[in-house]
Image (cartoon, helix red, strand yellow):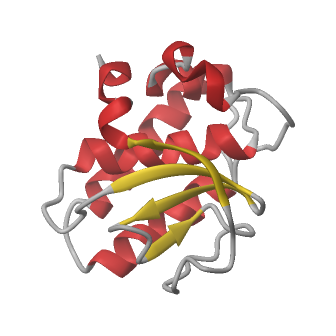
Amino acid sequence: MWPSLYQDRLEAWCQLRKKSAAGDISTCLQDIDQWWAQTPWKPYYLHMDDYEKWPDPWQLLSDNIYCDLARALGIVYTMLMLDREDIDTIQIAETDRGNLVLVDQGKYILNWRGSRLLNIEPTNFTITKSLDSSELDHLLG
């Protein structure tokens, strides 16, 4: 269940990051994907073209409004704060299947149909726009 109070969301997110800091990569990514999949959904909160103005992770949790792009952003923020060496590349991709998070050059796909982590060839969708995690580092402060 998604925490209704901001302070509770912060605490739950902190616990997620602690849990995800170690262990195998697949379990880590599955936990992160499942946690963000439980957010309340609202259409069109963020837009890819406005990425310079996207909220930092604390504002994202405070606003508590999550379109699929906001969920993807939360997933990316979580992984960036883990600083795991086995997570090579992170990318937010606007596709014909929604806004996805591609990890390790698309080896893992998050934010796909709820809390289902995929480990497939990324040929089942077409990328129209994408942002590398390095383009989002400045939002972490």
Q: Residue at x 63, y 76 (%)?
A: 116
Spot the residue most to the bottom: 120
| Picture layout, residue 97 above or below residue 91 | below
Residue appearing at x 44%, y 70% in the figure: 106
Residue positioned 36% across, 31% down in the render: 135
Give the left or right position of residue 132, taking residue 12 as reference.
Answer: left
Q: Is residue 48 left or right of residue 75?
A: right
Q: Quadrant of the C terminus?
A: top left
Q: Position of residue 46 (x, y in %)?
A: 70, 27
Q: Nearer the viewer, residue 96 or 1?
A: 96
Name the side, left or right, on which 139 lies relative to 31.
left
| The image quarter in which residue 11 lies | top left
In the displayed structure image, the side of residue 39 where residue 50 appears, left or right: left
Instruction: From the top left corner, tell me how far across and down residue 15 is, in percent.
Output: 36, 50
With respect to residue 86, does 119 lie above or below?
Answer: below
- Residue 38 figure quarter: bottom right
Q: Position of residue 64 (x, y in %)?
A: 69, 28
Which residue does the image show at 29% across and 36% down from the upper left? Answer: 134
Against 45, residue 76 (above or below) is below
**Which quadrant is home to the N terminus?**
bottom right
Q: Nearer the viewer, residue 66 or 122?
A: 122
Q: Nearer the viewer, residue 125 or 89?
A: 125
